[in-house]
Image: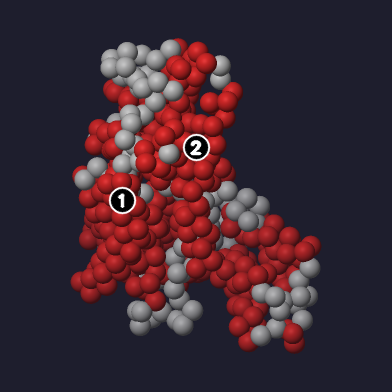
Amino acid sequence: MFGLETDIFILLFICVLCACIFEFVNGFHDTANAVATVIYTNSLKPTVAVVWSGFCNFLGVIFGGIAVAMGIVNLLPVELLIDQNIYHSIAMVLALLLSAIIWNFGTWFFGLPSSSSHTLIGSILGVGLAFSVMPEASDEAGVNWTKATEIFASLLLSPLVGFSLAVILMFVLRRALNKEARDQVFSEPKKNQEPPLWIRTILILTCTGVSFFHGNNDGQKGVGLVMLILIGIVPAYFALNGEIDANLVKTNLAAIEQTVSKIDTSLVGIEDKKRINKIQVSATDLKQLIAASPNGNINANNRLEARRDILVINSSLKKLTDSESVNLSDADKKVIKDNTDEKKGLRRMTDYAPFWVVLMISLSLGLGTMVGWKRIVVTVGEKIGKSHLTYAQGASAELVASMGIGLASALGLPVSTTHMLSSGIAGTMVASKGIKNLQAKTIRNILTAWVLTLPVSIFLSFTLYIFFRWIF
Protein backbone atom coordinates (compact mmCIF):
# COMPACT_ATOMS: atom_id res chain seq x y z
CA MET A 1 0.00 0.00 0.00
CA PHE A 2 1.26 3.54 -0.95
CA GLY A 3 4.28 1.74 -2.48
CA LEU A 4 5.98 1.45 0.91
CA GLU A 5 8.43 -1.15 2.09
CA THR A 6 6.94 -3.65 4.53
CA ASP A 7 8.74 -2.33 7.62
CA ILE A 8 7.74 1.28 6.89
CA PHE A 9 4.15 0.25 6.22
CA ILE A 10 4.04 -1.56 9.57
CA LEU A 11 5.40 1.54 11.31
CA LEU A 12 2.82 3.68 9.48
CA PHE A 13 0.07 1.36 10.70
CA ILE A 14 1.41 1.53 14.29
CA CYS A 15 1.55 5.33 14.16
CA VAL A 16 -2.02 5.68 12.88
CA LEU A 17 -3.17 3.13 15.47
CA CYS A 18 -1.45 5.17 18.20
CA ALA A 19 -3.26 8.30 17.01
CA CYS A 20 -6.59 6.46 17.25
CA ILE A 21 -5.65 5.17 20.70
CA PHE A 22 -4.79 8.71 21.80
CA GLU A 23 -8.20 9.91 20.65
CA PHE A 24 -9.88 6.87 22.24
CA VAL A 25 -8.12 7.61 25.56
CA ASN A 26 -9.03 11.27 25.12
CA GLY A 27 -12.66 10.16 24.79
CA PHE A 28 -12.87 8.19 28.01
CA HIS A 29 -10.52 10.60 29.81
CA ASP A 30 -12.77 13.58 29.05
CA THR A 31 -16.18 11.89 29.03
CA ALA A 32 -16.90 12.98 32.59
CA ASN A 33 -16.71 16.60 31.51
CA ALA A 34 -19.90 16.15 29.54
CA VAL A 35 -21.79 13.42 31.41
CA ALA A 36 -20.87 14.08 35.06
CA THR A 37 -23.71 16.49 35.72
CA VAL A 38 -26.49 14.60 33.92
CA ILE A 39 -25.50 11.34 35.62
CA TYR A 40 -24.94 12.91 39.01
CA THR A 41 -28.29 14.74 38.92
CA ASN A 42 -30.17 11.65 37.66
CA SER A 43 -31.17 13.51 34.51
CA LEU A 44 -30.03 10.55 32.39
CA LYS A 45 -29.07 6.98 33.18
CA PRO A 46 -25.31 6.43 32.88
CA THR A 47 -25.57 4.17 29.82
CA VAL A 48 -27.87 6.55 27.97
CA ALA A 49 -25.76 9.59 28.92
CA VAL A 50 -22.50 8.04 27.79
CA VAL A 51 -23.88 6.74 24.48
CA TRP A 52 -25.52 10.10 23.76
CA SER A 53 -22.31 11.95 24.65
CA GLY A 54 -20.31 9.61 22.40
CA PHE A 55 -22.67 10.26 19.50
CA CYS A 56 -22.46 14.05 20.00
CA ASN A 57 -18.65 13.85 20.16
CA PHE A 58 -18.76 11.94 16.87
CA LEU A 59 -20.89 14.66 15.25
CA GLY A 60 -18.65 17.37 16.69
CA VAL A 61 -15.61 15.94 14.90
CA ILE A 62 -17.48 15.44 11.62
CA PHE A 63 -18.69 19.06 11.52
CA GLY A 64 -15.72 20.64 13.29
CA GLY A 65 -13.58 21.74 10.35
CA ILE A 66 -9.77 21.62 10.57
CA ALA A 67 -8.70 25.02 11.98
CA VAL A 68 -7.66 23.56 15.34
CA ALA A 69 -6.06 20.56 13.61
CA MET A 70 -3.83 22.83 11.50
CA GLY A 71 -3.00 24.90 14.59
CA ILE A 72 -1.59 21.72 16.12
CA VAL A 73 0.37 20.85 12.95
CA ASN A 74 1.79 24.37 12.64
CA LEU A 75 3.32 24.26 16.11
CA LEU A 76 6.17 22.23 14.70
CA PRO A 77 9.11 23.80 12.84
CA VAL A 78 8.80 23.85 9.07
CA GLU A 79 12.05 21.87 8.65
CA LEU A 80 10.70 18.99 10.71
CA LEU A 81 7.45 18.93 8.74
CA ILE A 82 9.32 18.57 5.44
CA ASP A 83 12.12 16.25 6.56
CA GLN A 84 12.81 13.90 3.66
CA ASN A 85 13.92 11.09 5.99
CA ILE A 86 10.88 8.89 6.65
CA TYR A 87 12.42 7.38 9.78
CA HIS A 88 12.85 10.86 11.28
CA SER A 89 9.14 11.46 10.68
CA ILE A 90 8.27 8.15 12.31
CA ALA A 91 10.43 9.05 15.32
CA MET A 92 8.55 12.35 15.58
CA VAL A 93 5.03 10.94 15.56
CA LEU A 94 5.82 7.97 17.80
CA ALA A 95 7.47 10.23 20.37
CA LEU A 96 4.64 12.71 20.62
CA LEU A 97 1.89 10.07 20.50
CA LEU A 98 3.39 7.76 23.12
CA SER A 99 4.19 10.59 25.53
CA ALA A 100 0.64 11.94 25.22
CA ILE A 101 -0.93 8.50 25.73
CA ILE A 102 1.27 7.71 28.76
CA TRP A 103 0.37 10.92 30.60
CA ASN A 104 -3.32 10.83 29.60
CA PHE A 105 -3.75 7.25 30.73
CA GLY A 106 -1.83 7.84 33.96
CA THR A 107 -3.91 10.83 35.05
CA TRP A 108 -7.14 9.01 34.13
CA PHE A 109 -6.04 5.99 36.22
CA PHE A 110 -5.64 8.22 39.27
CA GLY A 111 -8.94 10.01 38.60
CA LEU A 112 -7.37 13.41 37.88
CA PRO A 113 -9.20 15.70 35.43
CA SER A 114 -6.03 16.75 33.60
CA SER A 115 -5.97 18.24 30.12
CA SER A 116 -5.51 16.19 26.96
CA SER A 117 -4.87 19.47 25.15
CA HIS A 118 -2.00 20.38 27.48
CA THR A 119 -0.60 16.89 27.08
CA LEU A 120 -0.64 16.90 23.29
CA ILE A 121 0.75 20.41 22.98
CA GLY A 122 3.50 19.62 25.48
CA SER A 123 4.39 16.51 23.48
CA ILE A 124 4.59 18.49 20.25
CA LEU A 125 6.75 21.16 21.88
CA GLY A 126 9.08 18.47 23.24
CA VAL A 127 9.57 17.00 19.77
CA GLY A 128 10.17 20.46 18.27
CA LEU A 129 12.76 21.29 20.93
CA ALA A 130 14.48 17.91 20.45
CA PHE A 131 14.66 18.47 16.69
CA SER A 132 16.28 21.87 17.20
CA VAL A 133 19.35 20.17 18.72
CA MET A 134 19.69 17.71 15.84
CA PRO A 135 22.69 18.12 13.46
CA GLU A 136 20.51 18.79 10.41
CA ALA A 137 18.49 21.57 12.10
CA SER A 138 19.30 25.13 11.02
CA ASP A 139 19.75 28.02 13.42
CA GLU A 140 16.10 29.04 12.90
CA ALA A 141 14.71 25.55 13.46
CA GLY A 142 12.59 25.10 16.53
CA VAL A 143 9.09 25.52 17.82
CA ASN A 144 6.72 27.98 16.16
CA TRP A 145 6.65 30.20 19.25
CA THR A 146 4.16 32.66 17.75
CA LYS A 147 1.57 29.91 17.43
CA ALA A 148 2.64 28.40 20.76
CA THR A 149 2.06 31.75 22.50
CA GLU A 150 -1.48 31.94 21.10
CA ILE A 151 -2.20 28.43 22.32
CA PHE A 152 -0.62 29.03 25.75
CA ALA A 153 -2.82 32.10 26.17
CA SER A 154 -5.99 30.17 25.33
CA LEU A 155 -5.05 27.30 27.67
CA LEU A 156 -4.19 29.70 30.49
CA LEU A 157 -7.20 31.96 30.14
CA SER A 158 -9.87 29.30 29.58
CA PRO A 159 -10.04 28.06 33.22
CA LEU A 160 -10.01 31.65 34.52
CA VAL A 161 -12.85 32.55 32.15
CA GLY A 162 -14.74 29.37 33.11
CA PHE A 163 -14.42 30.14 36.83
CA SER A 164 -15.44 33.80 36.50
CA LEU A 165 -18.42 33.22 34.18
CA ALA A 166 -19.74 30.42 36.40
CA VAL A 167 -19.70 32.76 39.43
CA ILE A 168 -21.54 35.45 37.44
CA LEU A 169 -24.11 32.99 36.07
CA MET A 170 -24.86 31.63 39.55
CA PHE A 171 -25.39 35.20 40.80
CA VAL A 172 -27.74 35.97 37.88
CA LEU A 173 -29.76 32.79 38.52
CA ARG A 174 -30.24 33.66 42.19
CA ARG A 175 -31.53 37.12 41.27
CA ALA A 176 -33.59 36.17 38.21
CA LEU A 177 -35.55 33.15 39.51
CA ASN A 178 -38.52 33.31 41.83
CA LYS A 179 -38.33 31.58 45.22
CA GLU A 180 -40.00 28.33 44.09
CA ALA A 181 -37.75 27.91 41.04
CA ARG A 182 -34.71 28.98 43.07
CA ASP A 183 -35.40 26.37 45.74
CA GLN A 184 -35.67 23.71 43.03
CA VAL A 185 -32.51 24.48 41.08
CA PHE A 186 -30.30 25.16 44.09
CA SER A 187 -31.21 21.90 45.82
CA GLU A 188 -29.01 18.80 45.81
CA PRO A 189 -30.13 15.84 43.66
CA LYS A 190 -32.16 13.24 45.49
CA LYS A 191 -30.98 9.67 45.14
CA ASN A 192 -32.58 7.82 42.19
CA GLN A 193 -35.03 10.70 41.63
CA GLU A 194 -35.20 12.67 38.40
CA PRO A 195 -35.15 16.50 38.62
CA PRO A 196 -38.12 18.58 37.47
CA LEU A 197 -38.61 18.33 33.69
CA TRP A 198 -37.46 21.88 32.89
CA ILE A 199 -34.28 21.43 34.91
CA ARG A 200 -33.66 18.02 33.35
CA THR A 201 -34.09 19.49 29.86
CA ILE A 202 -31.53 22.23 30.55
CA LEU A 203 -29.02 19.73 31.93
CA ILE A 204 -29.42 17.41 28.93
CA LEU A 205 -29.01 20.34 26.53
CA THR A 206 -25.84 21.55 28.27
CA CYS A 207 -24.47 17.99 28.25
CA THR A 208 -25.17 17.85 24.52
CA GLY A 209 -23.39 21.17 23.99
CA VAL A 210 -20.26 20.17 25.91
CA SER A 211 -20.14 16.80 24.11
CA PHE A 212 -20.52 18.34 20.65
CA PHE A 213 -17.99 21.10 21.22
CA HIS A 214 -15.57 18.69 22.89
CA GLY A 215 -15.60 16.66 19.66
CA ASN A 216 -15.42 19.91 17.70
CA ASN A 217 -12.22 20.95 19.49
CA ASP A 218 -10.49 17.84 20.81
CA GLY A 219 -11.38 15.71 17.81
CA GLN A 220 -9.54 18.10 15.53
CA LYS A 221 -6.38 17.48 17.54
CA GLY A 222 -6.58 13.82 16.54
CA VAL A 223 -7.13 14.81 12.92
CA GLY A 224 -4.02 16.99 13.12
CA LEU A 225 -2.03 14.08 14.53
CA VAL A 226 -3.03 11.73 11.73
CA MET A 227 -2.18 14.37 9.13
CA LEU A 228 1.27 14.76 10.71
CA ILE A 229 1.75 11.02 10.34
CA LEU A 230 0.55 10.84 6.74
CA ILE A 231 2.49 13.90 5.58
CA GLY A 232 5.66 12.67 7.29
CA ILE A 233 5.55 9.05 6.09
CA VAL A 234 3.70 9.16 2.76
CA PRO A 235 4.18 12.75 1.51
CA ALA A 236 3.70 11.73 -2.12
CA TYR A 237 0.03 11.12 -1.33
CA PHE A 238 -0.75 13.58 1.47
CA ALA A 239 1.71 16.51 1.41
CA LEU A 240 -0.79 18.44 -0.75
CA ASN A 241 -4.53 18.39 -1.24
CA GLY A 242 -4.88 16.41 -4.46
CA GLU A 243 -8.42 17.71 -5.01
CA ILE A 244 -7.19 21.28 -5.57
CA ASP A 245 -5.93 22.28 -9.02
CA ALA A 246 -2.45 23.70 -8.40
CA ASN A 247 -2.96 26.17 -11.26
CA LEU A 248 -5.50 27.98 -9.07
CA VAL A 249 -2.77 29.29 -6.74
CA LYS A 250 -0.92 31.10 -9.54
CA THR A 251 -3.10 34.16 -8.89
CA ASN A 252 -2.26 33.99 -5.18
CA LEU A 253 1.47 33.81 -5.93
CA ALA A 254 1.27 36.78 -8.30
CA ALA A 255 -0.54 38.90 -5.68
CA ILE A 256 2.00 37.94 -3.01
CA GLU A 257 5.00 38.72 -5.22
CA GLN A 258 3.52 42.05 -6.26
CA THR A 259 2.90 43.02 -2.63
CA VAL A 260 6.34 41.92 -1.42
CA SER A 261 7.97 43.91 -4.24
CA LYS A 262 6.58 47.10 -2.66
CA ILE A 263 8.77 46.66 0.42
CA ASP A 264 11.64 49.13 0.59
CA THR A 265 14.52 46.78 1.37
CA SER A 266 16.80 49.68 2.33
CA LEU A 267 14.70 50.20 5.46
CA VAL A 268 14.56 46.61 6.71
CA GLY A 269 17.02 44.58 8.77
CA ILE A 270 19.15 41.62 7.73
CA GLU A 271 16.63 39.01 8.94
CA ASP A 272 13.75 40.63 7.05
CA LYS A 273 15.89 40.74 3.89
CA LYS A 274 16.51 37.01 4.30
CA ARG A 275 12.76 36.44 4.62
CA ILE A 276 12.04 38.45 1.47
CA ASN A 277 14.64 36.40 -0.39
CA LYS A 278 13.12 33.15 0.93
CA ILE A 279 9.69 34.22 -0.32
CA GLN A 280 11.03 35.09 -3.77
CA VAL A 281 13.03 31.86 -4.11
CA SER A 282 10.17 29.67 -2.86
CA ALA A 283 7.60 31.42 -5.06
CA THR A 284 9.79 30.93 -8.13
CA ASP A 285 10.32 27.27 -7.28
CA LEU A 286 6.60 26.71 -6.68
CA LYS A 287 5.71 28.32 -10.01
CA GLN A 288 8.17 26.00 -11.77
CA LEU A 289 6.65 22.95 -10.07
CA ILE A 290 3.16 24.05 -11.13
CA ALA A 291 4.33 24.77 -14.69
CA ALA A 292 5.74 21.23 -14.87
CA SER A 293 2.26 19.90 -14.02
CA PRO A 294 -0.03 20.99 -16.88
CA ASN A 295 -2.99 19.06 -15.46
CA GLY A 296 -2.72 20.91 -12.14
CA ASN A 297 -1.72 17.78 -10.26
CA ILE A 298 1.86 18.26 -9.01
CA ASN A 299 4.08 15.24 -9.55
CA ALA A 300 4.10 12.90 -6.53
CA ASN A 301 7.87 13.21 -6.14
CA ASN A 302 7.62 17.00 -5.98
CA ARG A 303 4.71 17.38 -3.55
CA LEU A 304 6.82 17.60 -0.41
CA GLU A 305 8.97 20.27 -2.08
CA ALA A 306 5.83 22.19 -3.07
CA ARG A 307 4.56 21.92 0.50
CA ARG A 308 7.90 23.25 1.75
CA ASP A 309 7.61 26.25 -0.60
CA ILE A 310 4.11 27.08 0.64
CA LEU A 311 5.06 26.71 4.31
CA VAL A 312 8.18 28.84 3.88
CA ILE A 313 6.22 31.55 2.05
CA ASN A 314 3.48 31.55 4.69
CA SER A 315 5.89 31.54 7.64
CA SER A 316 8.11 34.27 6.20
CA LEU A 317 5.14 36.48 5.30
CA LYS A 318 3.77 36.24 8.84
CA LYS A 319 7.08 37.41 10.27
CA LEU A 320 7.34 40.21 7.73
CA THR A 321 3.85 41.55 8.42
CA ASP A 322 4.61 41.51 12.18
CA SER A 323 7.90 43.38 11.69
CA GLU A 324 7.77 47.09 12.53
CA SER A 325 10.48 47.94 10.01
CA VAL A 326 8.54 46.58 7.03
CA ASN A 327 6.58 49.33 5.25
CA LEU A 328 3.39 47.51 4.33
CA SER A 329 0.03 49.27 4.48
CA ASP A 330 -3.04 47.70 6.05
CA ALA A 331 -4.37 47.06 2.53
CA ASP A 332 -1.14 45.25 1.61
CA LYS A 333 -1.33 43.14 4.77
CA LYS A 334 -4.91 42.22 3.90
CA VAL A 335 -3.80 41.12 0.42
CA ILE A 336 -1.16 38.88 2.01
CA LYS A 337 -3.64 37.46 4.51
CA ASP A 338 -6.26 36.75 1.83
CA ASN A 339 -3.76 35.07 -0.48
CA THR A 340 -2.26 32.81 2.17
CA ASP A 341 -5.38 31.67 4.03
CA GLU A 342 -6.75 28.13 4.08
CA LYS A 343 -9.95 28.81 2.14
CA LYS A 344 -8.93 30.74 -0.97
CA GLY A 345 -5.18 31.28 -0.56
CA LEU A 346 -2.02 29.19 -0.77
CA ARG A 347 -2.81 27.17 2.33
CA ARG A 348 -5.83 25.51 0.73
CA MET A 349 -3.19 23.27 -0.82
CA THR A 350 -1.71 22.26 2.56
CA ASP A 351 -4.40 22.79 5.22
CA TYR A 352 -6.78 19.91 4.64
CA ALA A 353 -7.77 16.46 5.88
CA PRO A 354 -9.38 13.63 3.87
CA PHE A 355 -12.86 12.72 5.08
CA TRP A 356 -11.77 9.19 5.99
CA VAL A 357 -9.29 10.68 8.50
CA VAL A 358 -12.03 12.79 10.10
CA LEU A 359 -14.35 9.77 10.19
CA MET A 360 -11.70 7.50 11.75
CA ILE A 361 -10.93 10.03 14.50
CA SER A 362 -14.60 10.74 15.16
CA LEU A 363 -15.26 7.01 15.64
CA SER A 364 -12.24 6.67 17.95
CA LEU A 365 -13.33 9.61 20.08
CA GLY A 366 -16.97 8.55 20.12
CA LEU A 367 -16.18 4.97 21.12
CA GLY A 368 -13.70 6.13 23.74
CA THR A 369 -16.38 8.35 25.21
CA MET A 370 -18.49 5.29 25.95
CA VAL A 371 -16.04 3.71 28.43
CA GLY A 372 -14.04 4.66 31.48
CA TRP A 373 -16.20 7.59 32.61
CA LYS A 374 -16.79 6.62 36.24
CA ARG A 375 -13.46 7.59 37.85
CA ILE A 376 -13.57 11.24 36.90
CA VAL A 377 -17.36 11.62 37.32
CA VAL A 378 -16.88 11.05 41.04
CA THR A 379 -14.13 13.68 41.16
CA VAL A 380 -16.19 16.25 39.25
CA GLY A 381 -19.46 15.58 41.06
CA GLU A 382 -18.34 15.16 44.66
CA LYS A 383 -14.70 16.07 45.27
CA ILE A 384 -14.24 19.57 43.88
CA GLY A 385 -16.58 21.14 46.43
CA LYS A 386 -17.41 20.16 50.00
CA SER A 387 -21.13 20.20 49.21
CA HIS A 388 -22.66 17.98 46.56
CA LEU A 389 -23.32 19.41 43.10
CA THR A 390 -26.74 21.11 42.75
CA TYR A 391 -28.81 21.33 39.59
CA ALA A 392 -27.91 25.01 39.14
CA GLN A 393 -24.22 24.33 39.58
CA GLY A 394 -24.20 21.50 37.06
CA ALA A 395 -26.11 23.48 34.43
CA SER A 396 -24.06 26.65 34.96
CA ALA A 397 -20.71 24.87 34.72
CA GLU A 398 -21.67 22.99 31.55
CA LEU A 399 -23.23 26.04 29.89
CA VAL A 400 -20.03 28.03 30.49
CA ALA A 401 -17.88 25.13 29.25
CA SER A 402 -19.88 24.61 26.05
CA MET A 403 -19.84 28.34 25.22
CA GLY A 404 -16.11 28.64 25.92
CA ILE A 405 -15.14 25.58 23.89
CA GLY A 406 -17.42 26.56 21.02
CA LEU A 407 -15.87 30.04 20.83
CA ALA A 408 -12.34 28.61 20.95
CA SER A 409 -13.14 26.18 18.12
CA ALA A 410 -14.50 29.03 15.99
CA LEU A 411 -11.21 30.90 16.54
CA GLY A 412 -9.15 27.80 15.73
CA LEU A 413 -7.66 27.58 19.24
CA PRO A 414 -7.32 24.37 21.26
CA VAL A 415 -8.62 24.66 24.82
CA SER A 416 -8.96 22.22 27.67
CA THR A 417 -12.49 20.89 28.07
CA THR A 418 -11.43 19.42 31.41
CA HIS A 419 -10.19 22.70 32.83
CA MET A 420 -13.12 24.68 31.47
CA LEU A 421 -15.62 22.43 33.24
CA SER A 422 -13.61 21.83 36.43
CA SER A 423 -12.99 25.56 36.87
CA GLY A 424 -16.67 26.22 36.15
CA ILE A 425 -17.72 23.80 38.89
CA ALA A 426 -15.19 25.38 41.26
CA GLY A 427 -16.70 28.78 40.42
CA THR A 428 -20.21 27.58 41.23
CA MET A 429 -19.01 26.16 44.55
CA VAL A 430 -17.39 29.49 45.49
CA ALA A 431 -20.52 31.37 44.38
CA SER A 432 -22.66 29.19 46.66
CA LYS A 433 -20.75 29.21 49.95
CA GLY A 434 -17.46 31.01 49.35
CA ILE A 435 -13.94 29.72 48.81
CA LYS A 436 -14.14 27.56 51.93
CA ASN A 437 -16.57 25.36 49.98
CA LEU A 438 -13.74 24.00 47.83
CA GLN A 439 -12.00 20.75 48.77
CA ALA A 440 -8.38 21.74 49.10
CA LYS A 441 -6.99 18.28 48.36
CA THR A 442 -8.85 17.86 45.06
CA ILE A 443 -8.09 21.41 43.91
CA ARG A 444 -4.43 20.85 44.81
CA ASN A 445 -4.37 17.59 42.80
CA ILE A 446 -6.00 19.25 39.77
CA LEU A 447 -3.59 22.20 39.95
CA THR A 448 -0.65 19.82 40.33
CA ALA A 449 -1.73 17.91 37.21
CA TRP A 450 -2.24 21.25 35.41
CA VAL A 451 1.25 22.50 36.35
CA LEU A 452 3.03 19.19 35.67
CA THR A 453 1.34 18.26 32.39
CA LEU A 454 3.36 20.54 30.12
CA PRO A 455 6.84 19.93 31.56
CA VAL A 456 6.29 16.17 31.94
CA SER A 457 4.91 15.72 28.42
CA ILE A 458 7.68 17.94 26.98
CA PHE A 459 10.30 15.85 28.79
CA LEU A 460 8.73 12.55 27.72
CA SER A 461 8.45 13.46 24.04
CA PHE A 462 11.91 15.09 23.99
CA THR A 463 13.46 11.94 25.44
CA LEU A 464 11.46 9.55 23.26
CA TYR A 465 12.32 11.49 20.08
CA ILE A 466 16.05 11.32 20.87
CA PHE A 467 15.65 7.58 21.64
CA PHE A 468 13.75 6.77 18.43
CA ARG A 469 16.18 8.79 16.32
CA TRP A 470 18.98 6.69 17.84
CA ILE A 471 17.37 3.30 17.15
CA PHE A 472 16.00 4.07 13.65
What's the CA distance linking mark 1 and mark 2? 20 Å
Residue located at (47% from left, 43% from top): 163
Residue located at (47% from left, 55% from top): 156
Disc 2 secondary structure class: helix
In depth, the one of 321 and 167 nearer the eye is: 167
Residue located at (45% from left, 81% from top): 138
**Left or right: 112 as drawn, with respect to 151:** left
User: Residue under circle 1?
Assistant: 444
Residue located at (49% from left, 42% from top): 162
Instruction: Check disc 1 and give the amino acid type.
Output: Arg
| Dot label at residue 90 | none
In depth, the one of 58 and 26 nearer the eye is: 26
User: Residue under circle 2?
Assistant: 166
In depth, the one of 124 and 247 nearer the eye is: 124
Relative vertical location of residue 264 with respect to residue 459 in this rendering, above or below: below
Instruction: Check disc 2 and give the amino acid type.
Output: Ala
Question: Nearer the N terminus, badge 1 or badge 2?
Answer: 2
